[in-house]
Amino acid sequence: MRFPLIMTLIILLIGFVTDLLIYKSICRVGARPVWRKLYAVTSVLFALFWIVLICLPKRSGSDDSFERLMWCIYAYAAFYIPKYIYVVFDLIAGLPRLWHGKRLRWLSGVGLGIALVVMSGMWWGALVERYIIDVERVDVTIDNLPEAFDGMTIAQISDLHVGTFGSDTVFVHNLVDEVNALHPDLIVFTGDIVNRHTSELEPFVSTLSRLKSPYGVISILGNHDYGDYSDWPSDAAKAENFARLITLNRRMGWRLLNNESVAIDRGGDSLIVIGVENVGDPPFRTYGDLRAAYSALSDSLPKVLLSHNPAHWENDICGNDSINIALTLSGHTHAMQIKLFGWSPAAMRYRYWGGLYGDGGKHNLYVNIGSGEVAIPARIGATPEVTLLTLKTKRP
């Protein structure tokens, strides 16, 4: 499947009109011919990005072509979104001329300033912020937590999407070092380790196998881990890709829970860790089965659920007194890889998009905003997250 032709032509047309208006603005301020020519040439080159997109496959191509596609789209957006902003301000600045007034030159200057800030922020997110690892330390109080587990630490990582890094293991190496330096009792990974193909994981197996904790690494699958975002020559090829992912989890020494649970014993008491396959609202497919993973959901044992999509907690666990799951750990949202002054556009799509939430009763949810990227190779304000959760016994 190729990038839609009609959409490409519309984007090219909008870009052409935008560049024409900016060129006229450059001429209006009396810029030298060399600057006019330079702008014209660079505009043509960026338009060629979209011509390239017509030729690149969207789903069935190699992982390298998918990575190039992401960068082409982002590079185009990082230059043209600021241009759109400037043009809007410049057009508004010229409105007084309709009734023989003077152009508001100061407003054009404001538009130019905002455009430059946006452009700088977008490139900062792509070249710098996507590599700055942020450790979030969170205390979670659990009603029936035995004293033996009071103070237990869980390091959560999520949404690595290693295919976005190609074969460059530097960031993942640094992430592993960051997690190990926290000396957690348990490490959990809450899904989306790849973008489309298990082959993306191959260069990172050795690095990720270095994650160590007394209770090991427990992982689950996310919506990207099933191969649903790629075209396959046969069902058998897709099944082989999935089986390979499970094998690589074992090679890394991770305990992958596919609708399963495991008991962690400590000081004569037990903590149940439940892992379900992906459960989500449309358009994401559901593979998970909570009751198959652990049937006695109402028993008194303390439980931690690993479920990739926070919609699972919202739809099935929040406010449900028949389910005794004190803490659910999720990922998936990425905070849409944009977080500014505590707000993220993810809030328009997800009620629970990042951080610690509760229903006022016995159910808590923590949403990790992930470490990797998908769709755009950048994190603007939403830096890669490692969460260190400390379990606390509720005291009278």
Image (spheres, rainbow, N blue to C red):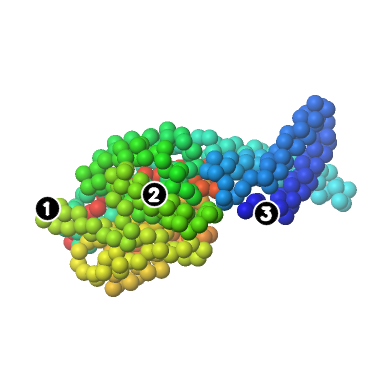
Q: Nearer the viewer, mark 2 or mark 3?
A: 2
The answer for how far apart the CA atoms under marks 1 and 2 are is 37 Å
Q: Going from the N terminus, do you reach mark 1 or mark 3 first? A: 3
- As rendered, which of 210 and 134 lies closer to the eye? 210
Whole-percent x, y for residue 195 in the image: 48, 48
Which mark lies nearer to you, 1 or 3?
3
- Do residues under tags 1 and 2 come within 8 Å of each other at their CB atoms? no
The answer to whether residue 242 is above or below residue 168 is: below
Amino acid at dot 2: Arg
Q: Position of residue 287 (x, y in %)?
A: 40, 63
- Tell me, for residue 244, which label it has, or none: 2
Q: Which mark is residue 340?
A: none
- Secondary structure under tag 3 reads loop
Image quadrant containing the C terminus = bottom left
Instruction: Please report contact status of discs 1 and 3: CB closer than 8 Å, yes or no.
Output: no
Residue 132 in the image, given as x and y percentages of width and height: 44, 37
Q: From the viewer's side, name the closer residue of 247 and 191.
A: 247
Q: Quadrant of the rendered structure where residue 29 is? A: top right
Task: Look at 72% across and 36% down and name the residue there.
Answer: 45
Residue at horizontal 87 percent and vertical 51 percent from the top: 99
Q: For the residue marked with disc 3, what is the amino acid?
A: Pro
Compared to residue 6, the image places residue 173 above or below, namely: above
Q: Secondary structure at mark 1?
A: loop
- The span from disc 1 to disc 3 (Cα, nearest Å) is 59 Å
Residue underneath mark 1:
267
336 or 290: nearer the eye? 290
Residue 240 percent coordinates (x, y):
42, 53
Please name which of the two marks, 1 or 2, marks the residue nearer to the observer.
2
